[in-house]
């Protein structure tokens, strides 16, 4: 699997290269559905064309039930091209996802995907710092799996949640210099891939950093010298306040950052423009569609500092 190619501007590639990889799979099959605390589910779906073209940051537009004409955009957490499946982590919110949570192995469903521009990698920035919050964790898992064991990248994944994580955490066996004392909880799957991970929460979970995941990222970045920071790039997905905080971290430490936005969508293929967001360009503000122009954007373009910006300088 290859990620989006390198670009001079440090952001995501032009979407035109990916518009031909949106497939309609009306006979996708549920392979398994696993329930976790707080209404979270991981569903594995046999969807070979989607699996073959998916990349970290892309998503699928899923028809949750035959009774619902509108699909739901859901980030792809894993994709196995050889076996033809994708995995999606979702939290039940609304009638559609509640119906999806009832789907059983062997049942058929319809989806379109993969959709969107994924993350870009830059070999000069091999220290990828992956920041995922809540249902923004899936693209970071996908990115971590893609980077695992792939020279020259040395990823570190930081995940935050205020509800129980959709996996059983365990103390990390991978030493991370500069990590705050007591922050030892990790995601076992990433550890199996050889990717260091740490967890953060304000809910008091054992082994987790006590605070927001972006605060954990800041504490870690403060321990790096100039040479190490010159190798860092931030990748993030999660709630808008978390992405704004990530953009501020990028400015503070003078490192590039890419963010994967979460927006409500109707068509998910660029026709309705219902997911458009304001993006700063050299020519001034412009409206971009999250579904096909994103969902991955340069953090500085979406959360630029200054009067009238989406982020400003407030902390």
Image (tube, rainbow, N blue to C red):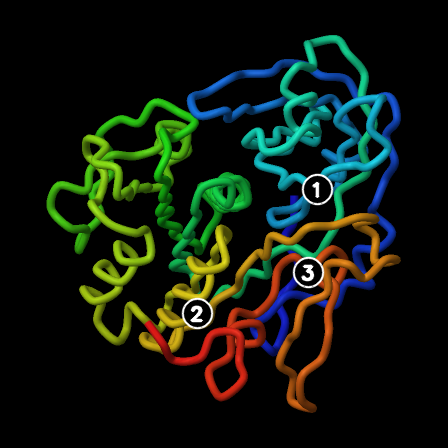
The residue indicated by pointer 2 is 247
Residue 261: percent from left, percent from top = 59, 57
Residue 234: percent from left, percent from top = 43, 62
Tell which tag, 1 or 3, sits nearer the viewer.
Answer: 1
In 3D space, how far apart are the residues under numbered discs 1 and 3 (Cα atoms)?
A: 13 Å
Report the residue that reaches farthest toward the left.
181
Q: Residue at x 65, y 28 (%)?
A: 97
The residue indicated by pointer 3 is 294
Residue 268: percent from left, percent from top = 79, 50
From the image, which quarter does the C terminus lie in? bottom left
In 3D space, how far apart are the residues under numbered discs 3 and 2 (Cα atoms)?
A: 16 Å
Image: 291 above or below 53? below
Report the residue that reaches farthest toward the bottom.
283
Image: 10 above or below 150? below
Badge 1 crowding class, 10 Å Cα cut-off, few under 14, some 14 to 19, many 20 or more, is many
Disc marking residue 73: 1
The first of marks 1 and 3 along the sequence is 1
Left or right: residue 188 compared with residue 258? left
Left or right: residue 244 compared with residue 116? left
The first of marks 3 and 2 along the sequence is 2
Q: Residue at x 74, y 55 (%)?
A: 291
């Amino acid at each position: 699997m290859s990620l989006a190619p390198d670009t001079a501007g440090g952001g995501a590639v032009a979407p035109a290269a990916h518009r031909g990889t949106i497939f309609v799979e009306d006979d996708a099959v549920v392979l398994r559905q696993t329930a976790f605390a707080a209404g979270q589910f991981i569903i594995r779906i046999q969807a070979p064309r989607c699996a073959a073209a998916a990349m970290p940051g892309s998503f699928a537009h899923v028809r949750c039930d035959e009774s619902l004409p509108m699909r739901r955009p859901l980030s792809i957490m894993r994709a196995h091209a050889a076996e033809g499946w994708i995995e999606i982590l979702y939290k039940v919110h609304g009638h559609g996802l509640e119906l999806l949570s009832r789907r059983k192995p062997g049942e058929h469903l319809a989806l379109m995907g993969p959709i969107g521009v994924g993350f870009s990698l830059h070999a000069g920035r091999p220290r990828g710092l992956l920041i995922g919050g809540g249902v923004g964790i899936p693209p970071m898992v996908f990115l971590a799996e893609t980077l695992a064991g792939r020279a020259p990248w040395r990823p570190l994944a930081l995940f935050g949640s205020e509800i129980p994580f959709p996996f059983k955490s365990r103390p990390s066996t991978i030493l991370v210099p500069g990590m705050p004392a007591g922050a030892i909880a990790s995601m076992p799957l990433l550890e199996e891939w050889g990717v260091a991970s740490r967890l953060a929460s304000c809910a008091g979970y054992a082994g987790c950093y006590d605070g927001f995941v972006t605060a954990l990222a800041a504490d870690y970045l403060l321990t790096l010298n100039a040479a190490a920071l010159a190798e860092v790039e931030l990748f993030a997905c999660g709630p808008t306040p978390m992405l704004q905080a990530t953009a501020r971290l990028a400015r503070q430490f003078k490192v590039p950052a890419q963010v994967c936005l979460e927006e409500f969508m109707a068509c998910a293929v660029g026709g309705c423009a219902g997911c458009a967001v304001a993006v700063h360009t050299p020519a001034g503000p412009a409206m971009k569609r999250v579904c096909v122009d994103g969902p991955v954007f340069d953090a500085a373009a979406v959360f630029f500092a200054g009067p009238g910006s989406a982020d400003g300088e407030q902390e």
